[in-house]
Structures are given as C-alpha cells and as structure tokens.
Image: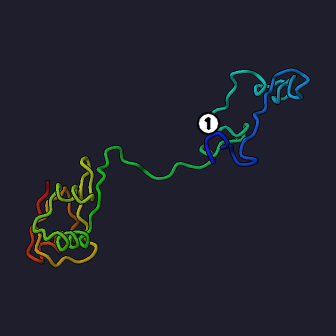
C-alpha cells in the first residue's frame, strides 16, 4: 500500500445534489423548495423555537421559582474531603491556596466548608464560609476556623 492507491471505503463518499441547474437535471424549476410561500423565497429563516404557529414550548411551560439577582454561589467542600487531604499530604492548615492547588476550587470561586463525613485531624481551616455542623466538628477536634 502507498499514497497512490489510497481511496475511501466503498459507500463512504456521496455526490452532492446539484439543485437549480436546469429542468434536465430533475432538480430544476422550484429546486426542491416547493411552490410559493416564505420557504421558497431567498433569505427566509424561522425564529428559534418556532413551531409553525403552534404555541412554542418555551411559552407553554410556566415560569417556576425565584432566582435572586445577587445570590452568592459557593463551591462546597466537605469534612471528609478535608480529612483525606490532611492524611494524604500531612497538612495542618488548609486554606484557599491549598484547595486551589489540589483542584477543589478555581481562582474566582468562593469556598464553603460543609459538614458531611467526620474529621479526626486537628486542622486550621480558612475558607469564605462554614456550615454550622462543619464549624462545630472542626472545633470539637481542637482545630480552628477563619473566615476569609
């Protein structure tokens, strides 16, 4: 085999339909656009979500809930994750830079420590927010919390 005898697999390539090239081609005249109407005209396009005059889905389905405009979005990190970090890398303090280095937060994230799991290591934890259960658990082991 060499470059001179390479060719695509059987049936892999198809000739494109050349429309609008005269009556003899079988695709002349209206050129597959049908008769009259907006679809036959050049430059025609329908709006996104248009369903032929039927009420579109985004208008049939009601609005639900309330989204506060100034909500602060936190990335949650649980106690069991902190415990694993402390054991794996023998850490005594965990701050935002540590979490960022281990891929648990991005540079623009706000971090909230959550109370799932249990913590055994005495840790000094620095984060933007703490849940009540997480702060109790950290302080019960003898660690300290600091809000950034």
Residue 10: percent from the left, percent from the top? Answer: 75, 48
Query: Residue at image x 9%, y 67%?
Result: 144
* Residue at horizontal 25 percent and vertical 69 percent from the top: 81
- Across and down, in percent, residue 131 comes to 23, 65
Q: Would you place residue 4 above or below residue 62 in this image? A: above
Position of 13 with respect to 61 (left or right) is right
Against 99, residue 57 (above or below) is: above
Q: Is 12 situated above or below 88?
A: above
Answer left or right for 123 relative to 113.
left
The image quarter in which residue 132 lies: bottom left
Above or below for 24 versus 147:
above
Tag 1 residue: 48
Of residues 32 and 117, the one nearer the viewer is 32
Residue 56 screen position, x and y as percent:
65, 42
Towards the viewer: 29 or 6 = 6
x then y, percent, for residue 112: 24, 60
Looking at the image, the residue that sits furthest to the right is 24
Instruction: Answer with left or right where residue 9 lies relative to residue 127.
Output: right
Residue 103, picture quadrant: bottom left
How many marks do you count on the picture? 1
* Residue at horizontal 84 percent and vertical 29 percent from the top: 34
* 89 and 94: which is toward the camera: 89
User: Could you say which quadrant of the image residue 124 lies in?
Assistant: bottom left
Residue closest to the eye, 19 or 77: 19
Query: Please, which colouring scheme is shown?
Result: rainbow
Secondary structure at numbered mark 1: loop
Q: How many residues crowd around disc 1 within 10 Å: few (fewer than 14), some, or many (20 or more)?
A: few
């Amino acid at each position: 085999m060499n470059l001179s005898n390479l060719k695509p697999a059987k049936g892999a390539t198809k000739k494109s339909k050349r429309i609008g090239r005269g009556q003899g081609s079988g695709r002349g005249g209206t050129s597959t656009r049908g008769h009259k109407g907006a679809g036959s005209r050049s430059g025609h396009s329908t709006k996104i979500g248009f369903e032929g005059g039927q009420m579109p889905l985004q208008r049939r389905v009601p609005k639900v809930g309330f989204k506060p405009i100034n909500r602060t979005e936190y990335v949650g990190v649980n106690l069991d994750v902190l415990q694993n970090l402390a054991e794996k890398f023998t850490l005594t303090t965990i701050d935002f830079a540590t979490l960022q280095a281990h891929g648990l937060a991005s540079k623009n994230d706000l971090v909230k420590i959550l109370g799932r799991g249990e913590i055994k290591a005495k840790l000094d934890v620095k984060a933007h927010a703490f849940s009540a259960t997480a702060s109790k658990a950290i302080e019960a082991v003898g660690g300290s919390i600091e809000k950034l």
